Amino acid sequence: MRLSHDAGTVVWPRDADGDYARRALTPVLQCSASTFVRNAHVQVAVLSDGLAALPITYDPAWKDTFTVSPVTHLAHYAAEELHKLVPPPLTRPGKVLLGGLGLVLRELGFERAVYINSWLLSTNLYPHLTPDQLRSATRALLAAFPDRPLVW
């Protein structure tokens, strides 16, 4: 597997999934994620081996969408949805607590996570990957991002 930030260097699979990936990801690589998802100021790359193409996202901006930001996913989005889960007297203290959690998670480096197969959607379906492809993908990403957690 090889990581590419330029659509012209991606080895796209020669099947329907590869064609879809090429058509969907080329504009994102050429413009930026935020061109298509307003609150996704994230870096995008593609990990591919000619049989599978996986979009990779990393380095989200502060309070980006929960689909690209682990801190927003775990703290900010949770605070926004709190009113659905707890009675009104607990909503404000809960939001304060979750806001503090967001600051702690950010300080601990949670935003440095690298999302694998992130199509900028809340649910990302995975292609069939062999054990060799999974090992190759992990090795390539650990080489590119040696100090970051990988999120599948």
Image (cartoon, rainbow, N blue to C red):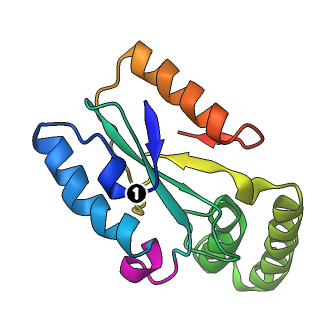
| Foreground residue among 10 and 104 | 10
Residue 98: x percent and y percent?
79, 70
Residue 128: x percent and y percent?
29, 27
| Foreground residue among 50 and 107 | 50
* Residue at 78% from the left image edge and 79% from the top image edge: 95
Which portion, as a residue range, is magenta?
A: 33-39
| Foreground residue among 99 and 4 | 4
Q: Where 74 falls versus 11 (above or below)?
A: below
Amino acid type indicated by mark 1: Asp
* Residue at 24% from the left image edge and 42% from the top image edge: 12
Residue 56: x percent and y percent?
48, 50
Residue under pointer 1: 6
Residue 75: x percent and y percent?
72, 67
* Number of on-image labels: 1
Q: Is residue 40 visible?
A: yes
Q: Residue furthest front?
A: 8
* Residue at 58% from the left image edge and 25% from the top image edge: 139
* Residue at 65% from the left image edge and 33% from the top image edge: 142
Q: Residue furthest left?
A: 16
Q: Per the image, is 32 magenta?
A: no
The image quadrant of residue 91 is bottom right
The image quadrant of residue 141 is top right
Q: Where 74 falls versus 4 (above or below)?
A: below
Q: Is residue 57 left or right of residue 18?
A: right
Q: Is residue 47 left or right of residue 151?
A: left
| Foreground residue among 5 and 88 | 5
Q: Quadrant of the N terminus?
A: top left
User: Circle 1 — which element?
Assistant: loop
The image quadrant of residue 36 is bottom left
Q: Is residue 86 visible?
A: no
Q: Is residue 152 left or right of residue 21?
A: right
Q: Residues within 10 Å of mark 1 (few under 14, many from 20)?
A: some
